[in-house]
Amino acid sequence: MTVQPQRNAIGGHVPVAGGLAANGIPYAEEIGAESVQVFTANPRSWATSRGNPAQDEEFRRLCRRLDVPAYVHAPYLINFGSHNEETAERSVASLSHSLGRGREIGANGVVVHTGSATGGRTREAALDQVRALVLPLLDGLTHPEDPPLLLEPTAGQGFSLCSQVADLGPYFDALDHHPRLGVCLDTCHVFAAGHDLTVEGEATRMLDLLVETVGPGRLQLVHANDSKAGAGSRLDRHENIGAGHIGPAAFGELLAHPATAGVPFVIETPGGKEGQAADVALLKSLRKP
């Protein structure tokens, strides 16, 4: 890790079984991470955890001392577009928990997938439900240490509400472009959704469109993942940087764009510590001073 501020803090999603500070921080140090993302609950369950206050405080202290921005990723089951009433209710409870845990550990943001319309309902009906369920959560973020909510578009599978960058427009409209709303852009997702980042200049055009669609300053985190599948495949299959279909050049283009200035890049790639350390090092080599 480094205590020197960087244009982009390059880091990774770190495992925290056994303790946020006890396990998460040492893992981050081993892969050379300058930023971290964590789960504060089982990502594939509705179960929630009260956390460990001592670990929370130590995690906050270490992140401050090391100047490492931290993010929480909400569970994967959350879907505010679901026609299933129980799923919708549990989604509210789960995201509320993640936002609360984010505040407790000093997170800079809470990432949530934008979900899909299910049960044959229209996109418009699903977005009306997103508004009804999510806007009250955003309005409740009134404490100075409450983290913003970062919307992560998906790879386009199923009846995705938001996959390509233009889809963020109606989603932000549904939530009144709330001031506590931001974007987490996953490179694998946008590539699989149809933004072919292998084409020279496409990464720049995609980010230009993002700013045009949601406004400047809304992009607050990048999930930097290569893709096992091709552009437009709608398959969410992460790969190590340079080992997939996207390739390093696109990441260099993303890192050089004005919209990513000061925005942390977090990898969610396979390969364990060795593979992830290599990804972090490669992204650092592509980073502009």
Image: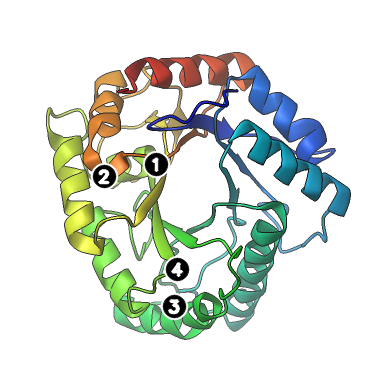
The quarter of the rendered structure image containing the N terminus is top right
Q: Earlier in the sequence, mark 3 or mark 1?
A: 3
**Spatial CA span between label 3 and label 1:** 26 Å
Q: Earlier in the sequence, mark 1 or mark 4?
A: 4
**Spatial CA span between label 2 and label 3:** 27 Å
**Spatial CA span between label 1 and label 4:** 16 Å
Question: Which residue is found at the position 73% from the left and 42% from the top?
Answer: 61
Question: Which residue is found at the position 66% from the left and 22% from the top?
Answer: 29
- Per the image, the residue denoted by label 3 is 130
Task: Give SS at disc 4.
Answer: loop
Q: Is residue 115 left or right of residue 122?
A: right
Residue 263 disc label = 1
The one nearer the camera, 142 or 121, is 142
Q: Is residue 80 left or right of residue 209?
A: right
Q: Neighbour class for label 4 at 10 Å: few (<14), some, many (≥20)?
A: some
Q: Amino acid at mark 3?
A: Val
- Per the image, the residue denoted by label 4 is 180
- Per the image, the residue denoted by label 2 is 259
Cβ atoms at labels 2 and 4 below 8 Å apart: no
The one nearer the camera, 115 or 172, is 172
Question: Which residue is found at the position 56% from the left and 17% from the top?
Answer: 277
Question: What sort of colour scheme is used for the picture?
Answer: rainbow
Cβ atoms at labels 4 and 3 below 8 Å apart: no
Q: Neighbour class for label 3 at 10 Å: few (<14), some, many (≥20)?
A: many
